[in-house]
Amino acid sequence: MALSNIKRVKSSEIELKDRLVSIQRVAKVTKGGRTFSFSAIVVVGDENGIVGYGLGKAKEVTEAITKGIDDAKKNLVKVPIINGTVPHEQYGKYSGGSVLIKPAVHGTGVLAGGAMRAVLESAGIKDVLAKSLGSSNPHNVVKATVDALASMRDAYTVAQHRGVDLNKVFNG
């Protein structure tokens, strides 16, 4: 959506935790038989508003995960978090994957499945309602979730963008 909202972050300044979302064994059929390799989707985050995802491919599982972590550290974005939840409802889309993310009251927890849960927890979101509406492919779900989170704006950013006082955003 709005690419101006995406705030890139340097990975060297922060302590990141990684989560393995999915690992797949893929085969390449050649004249000599099948050659197996692995692809791994990894999400990294500091659990304080910074999250990124990466894809690693290699002949060994550990190498694929390491490459995924390195790739994820290059794709970090800043996410606005207000009282442990997201500031507003947001749709995200990537290819066939569509996601809906809604704020929730304190104590709800992360109501999301699979790949979305890893992204939301790595970002540090404690209470959220989320639903995957399209493809269940982990690649597309992770990218759609990051798209939705990167598109979110907090009230201060909206007020600054409009050039008005913060009270005017809420009270009209």
Image (cartoon, rainbow, N blue to C red):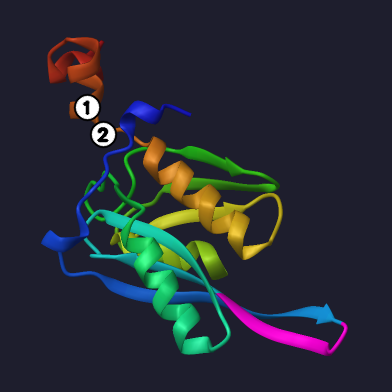
Q: Kindly identify which residue carries mark 2.
A: 154
Residue 77 appears in view: yes
- Give the quadrant of the C terminus: top left
Q: Is residue 31 left or right of residue 50?
A: right
Whole-percent x, y for residue 159 in the image? 20, 19
| Mark 1 element type | helix
- Residue 157, labelled with which disc? 1
Q: In the orientation shown, which residue stands out farthest toward the right?
A: 31
What range is drawn magenta here?
A: 31-39
Q: Quadrant of residue 6?
A: top left
Residue 108 appears in view: no
Q: Is residue 72 left or right of residue 14?
A: right
Please say whether residue 38 is one of the residues in the magenta stretch: yes
For image coordinates 17% across by 19% down, the residue present is 160
- 123 or 29: nearer the viewer: 29
| Mark 2 element type | loop
Whether the residues at callouts 2 and 1 have beta carbons within 8 Å, the answer is: yes
Whole-percent x, y for residue 4 in the image? 33, 27
Vertical order, 159 against 56 (above or below): above
Q: Which secondary structure class fits the magenta region best?
A: strand
Vertical order, 34 against 4 (above or below): below
Q: Is residue 21 left or right of residue 134?
A: left
